[in-house]
Image (cartoon, rainbow, N blue to C red):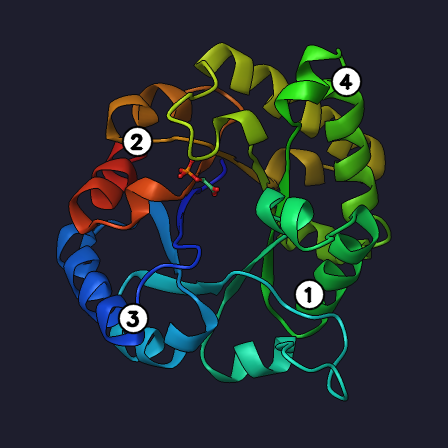
Amino acid sequence: MRTKIVAGNWKMNKTASEAAALIEGIKKEVAGISKVEVVVCPPFTDLKDAAAACAGSNVALGAQNVHWEASGAFTGEISAAMLKDLGVTYVIIGHSERRQYFGETDETVNKRTKAALAAGLIPIVCVGETLAERDAGQMESVVVRQTKAGLADLGDGLKKVVIAYEPVWAIGTGRTASPAQAQEVHALIRRTLAEISCGDTANTIRIQYGGSMKPENAQELMSQPDIDGGLIGGAALKADSFAAIVKAGV
Ligand code: PGA
């Protein structure tokens, strides 16, 4: 059985003090929940205060990106060891906004994923097609390519990875994939994982859905056989809506 995992992707929202306050609110709402893993991913500048707020609770901390090099002349970048040292457990890699606005490629996703695993972080690797790709009948080829390339050559590390399927047309648009549409792609991703791994690995990897997930649709989405949680943007910025999604997964 896969333990569901609900993660809040805060994107470029919340100052450090706002982050601490939001985490306090989330902690109260989700106290005692152990059936669903709860993760918050604030901006880098919030992580230290966020780690203090998460300490001793069932809310784990994630970051939104990581560089692949360990250290050196890479102005503006953050290494996996820096995140680990702050108490970060998870890191989002290859979010579609990074692919769209910041030149992220399947190759850099793979490098970041390897660096995260090497430092003991758990990568949340994002895949998903754009509307143009879906309309052109390319959903399957895009998702399979992103999955295979992003997760290439991870060895045993693959077992630790979390995948987030986020159709780009559903992110921040209010237009959610239907449970059947999402399940179809999640099953495709799991079949792809079976191709690139051995044993039972493909059945143990968690695949989150992301894209306008909210309290109203979370339960139906997460009750699909291959949907193991959510990566939540807008609805993660308020304690009550985020907690309602977590509870929908219990
Ligand atoms: P959304 O964002 O929930 O606001 O659609 C999801 C994401 O981008 O991870």
Q: Secondary structure at mark 1?
A: helix
Q: CA distance from mark 4 to mark 2?
A: 27 Å
Q: Which residue is mark 2?
A: 214
Specify the quadrant that holds the C terminus.
Answer: top left
Q: Secondary structure at mark 2?
A: loop
Residue 78 visible: yes
Please report whichever mark, 4 or 3, sits nearer to the chain's N-terminal start.
Answer: 3
Residue 94 visible: no
Q: Secondary structure at mark 4?
A: loop
Q: Residues within 10 Å of mark 1 (few under 14, many from 20)?
A: many
Q: Which residue is mark 4?
A: 138
Q: CA distance from mark 4 to mark 3?
A: 41 Å
Q: Residues within 10 Å of mark 4 (few under 14, many from 20)?
A: some
Q: Residue at x 46, y 82 (%)?
A: 86
Please report whichever mark, 1 or 2, sits nearer to the chain's N-terminal start.
Answer: 1
Residue at the front extreme of this rendering: 101
Please report whichever mark, 4 or 2, sits nearer to the chain's N-terminal start.
Answer: 4
Q: CA distance from mark 1 to mark 2?
A: 30 Å
Give the amino acid at mark 3: Cys
Q: Which residue is mark 3?
A: 54
Q: Is residue 208 above or below residue 227?
A: below
Residue 56, percent across and down? 27, 74
